[in-house]
Amino acid sequence: MDLKSIWYLMLIILGVVSIIYLPLCASAISRLKDSHNLLWKKYGSFELFANNNIVSSSRFLKLIVTRAYVGINDIDLVKKLDLCRALLVIATFCVVIVFFITIYMIGFNKN
């Protein structure tokens, strides 16, 4: 498989991850807001569209990355947030691969 094919494959994977991540994240945020309001407020009162800025996004990302939600007594929410975390790892990996392949193809394909 050549680099161009890998590049396109990573973009397709990013698209699929985004399609899964956004509704899953919206559902998790809604449940967090309704059932665990103190934790939701502690991590920036984040919403997918309404209160989405750098500060609230970084706080929500911190919640997911540090797994600060594990202590709550809501197995479904923990599973959703764990899946959000896994999808973020996959997306980050794909973005890094796409970035480096792009730099490589631009730098070495000059004619």
Image (spheres, rainbow, N blue to C red):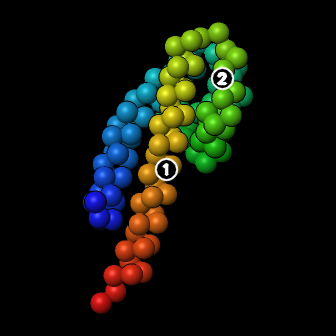
The disc labelled 2 sits on which kind of residue? Tyr
Decide: is 4 above or below 87.
Answer: below
Q: Position of residue 21 (x, y in %)?
A: 42, 34
Q: Quadrant of residue 72?
A: top right
The disc labelled 1 sits on which kind of residue? Phe
Res. 56 visible in picture: no
Decide: is 99 above or below 34.
Answer: below
The span from disc 1 to disc 2 (Cα, nearest Å) is 23 Å
Q: Position of residue 48 (x, y in %)?
A: 49, 35
Q: Position of residue 86 (x, y in %)?
A: 51, 34
Q: Residues within 10 Å of mark 2 (few under 14, many from 20)?
A: some
The residue where tag 2 is placed is 69
Would residue 3 be found to the left or right of residue 84 on screen? left
Q: Residue at x 50, y 22 (%)?
A: 80
Quadrant in which the N terminus appears = bottom left
Q: Residue at x 45, y 63 (%)?
A: 99
Decide: is 51 above or below 102.
Answer: above
> Disc 1 vs disc 2: which is toward the camera?
1
**Tag 1 and tag 2, C-beta contact below 8 Å:** no
Res. 83 visible in picture: yes
Disc 2 is placed on an element classified as loop
Q: Residue at x 64, y 43 (%)?
A: 58
Q: Residue at x 47, y 37 (%)?
A: 87
The residue where tag 1 is placed is 93
Q: Earlier in the sequence, mark 1 or mark 2?
A: 2
Q: Residue furthest bottom?
A: 111
